[in-house]
Amino acid sequence: MARPLYVLNGPNLNRLGTREPEIYGSDTLADIEQACVRVAGARPVVFRQTNHEGELIDWIHEAGDRGCALVLNPAGFGHTSVALLDALRSISIPVIECHLSNPAAREEFRQVSFVSPAATGVVSGFGPASYEMAVEAALRLVGSAPSKS
Ligand code: DQA
């Protein structure tokens, strides 16, 4: 059985669909999950969201132990959490940092990322398509073909 691709989501992303739609669009997290599963094709996907930093850290460890790669939207924690950076440095699978918006083009406090120094790469600014691109990138890195449909 292939090791799954982990797609982990941080705080407030459960509110996508109604949360600041002018910035984040109208897709829900369930819509995004469906798109990730479609792009991943035969590769199993573990897709989760939490509002709790410790839980996210536990899941990062789990991804490192059981997954082939990690797509991570750290949301607000990405701008604040040394612990998240330490967790990412404790695992050795590829990590793709993913954002719907482009934090580099927003407020100054969003221009700090505690995730980027431990990420293999970053995809941001393409709305829900950022996730599809991040899944594709992760699959390329682990040598499995994304679904073309
Ligand atoms: C976000 C960008 C972050 O700055 C913000 O705190 C989020 C969402 C994004 O996907 O664009 O919650 O990670």
Image (spheres, grey):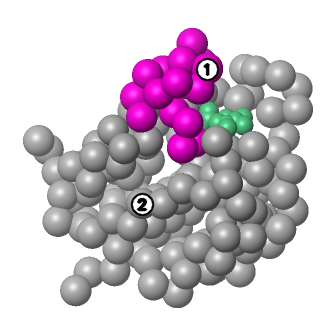
Nearer the camera: disc 1 or disc 2: 1
Amino acid bearing label 1? Glu
Question: Residue placed at 74% from the left, 70% from the top?
Answer: 54
Bounds of the magenta segment: 13-28
Residue 13 image-quadrant placement: top right
Circle number at residue 47: 2
| Residue 118 visible, this angle | no
- Say if disc 1 is inside 8 Å of ligand 1: no
Task: Tell me the quadrant of the picture where the N terminus can be found.
Answer: bottom left
Question: Which amino acid type is shown beneath numbered disc 2?
Answer: Phe
Percent of width and height locating residue 23: 59, 18
x and y, in percent, of residue 139 in the image = 34, 60
Along the polypeptide, which appears first: circle 1 or circle 2?
1
Q: Nearer the viewer, residue 140 or 12?
A: 12
In the image, residue 37 lies in the stretch drawn in magenta: no
The residue positioned 54% from the left and 56% from the top of the image is: 49
Task: Give above or below for 130 relative to 82.
Answer: above
Q: Secondary structure at mark 2?
A: strand
| Quadrant in the rendering for residue 91 | bottom right
Q: Is residue 93 visible?
A: yes
Is 50 rendered above or below residue 30? below
Which disc is residue 20 wearing?
Answer: 1
- Residue 95 position in % (x across, y down): 56, 62
Q: Is residue 84 above or below residue 107?
A: below
Q: In terms of image quarters, where does ligand 1 lie? A: top right
Residue situated furthest top in the rendering: 22
